[in-house]
Amino acid sequence: MHEMGIILHLAKTLEETAEEEHLTKIGSVTLEVGEVSGIMTDLFKDCWEYFSAKKDLLRGSELKLVTLPAVTFCESCRQEYETVKFGKTCPFCGSTETYLVRGNECIIKEIEAE
C-alpha cells in the first residue's frame, strides 16, 4: 500500500508550504493524478481522511483528485494515442517502439488555505 507513503510525503510538502507562506489551515488540496500512476483513488482518499484527522493543519480539509489521461507516443509513426485503451502497441502502425508521455504523475495543482 504505497498510498499512505504518498500521503505522508504530501503532508510533509503541505507543512513546508504552510510554514513558508505563514498558513494556519489547509481547506483543500487538489491533486492531478495520472490514470496509470498506480494510485488506487478510493484507498488514497481513505488514507487522507485517516491521516488528515491527526494533523491540526489538515484536519477537516478536502482532498480533490483530478484524473489525467495517460498518453503514449510511438517512435515509429510519431503519433500519440490513449495508453489505457491500446497499451504498448501503437494502434496506428502496430509498432511497440513506444513510450509513456504522461499519465503516471501525481502533482499538487492547488492548495486552498487560510
Image (tube, helix red, strand yellow):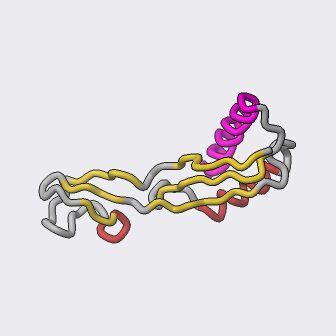
Residue 80 placed where, x, y %? 25, 60
- Report whether 54 appears left or right of 85: right
Quadrant in the picture for residue 81: bottom left
Work out whether 24 lies above or below 94.
above
Looking at the image, residue 58 sits to the left or right of residue 79; the answer is right
Closest to the observer: 69 or 50?
69
Secondary structure that dominates the magenta span:
helix
Quadrant assignment for the C terminus: top right
Q: Residue 5: x percent and y percent?
A: 64, 43
Q: Nearer the viewer, residue 16 or 76?
A: 16
Query: What is the x, y in percent for residue 32?
Result: 54, 54
Q: Residue at x 62, y 45 (%)?
A: 6
Instruction: Examine the structure image and report whether residue 18 is included in the region drawn in magenta.
Output: yes
Residue 112 x %, y % = 71, 49
User: Does residue 69 appear to the left or right of 28 in the view shown?
Assistant: left
Q: Is residue 30 magenta?
A: no
Q: Residue at x 34, y 63 (%)?
A: 83
In the figure, is residue 28 to the left or right of 33? right
Outermost residue, top direction? Answer: 20
Rendering quarter of residue 87: bottom left
**Which residues are the magenta region?**
1-21
In the displayed structure, 54 sits above or below 13; it is: below
* Residue shown at the point (77%, 52%) measured from the top left: 27
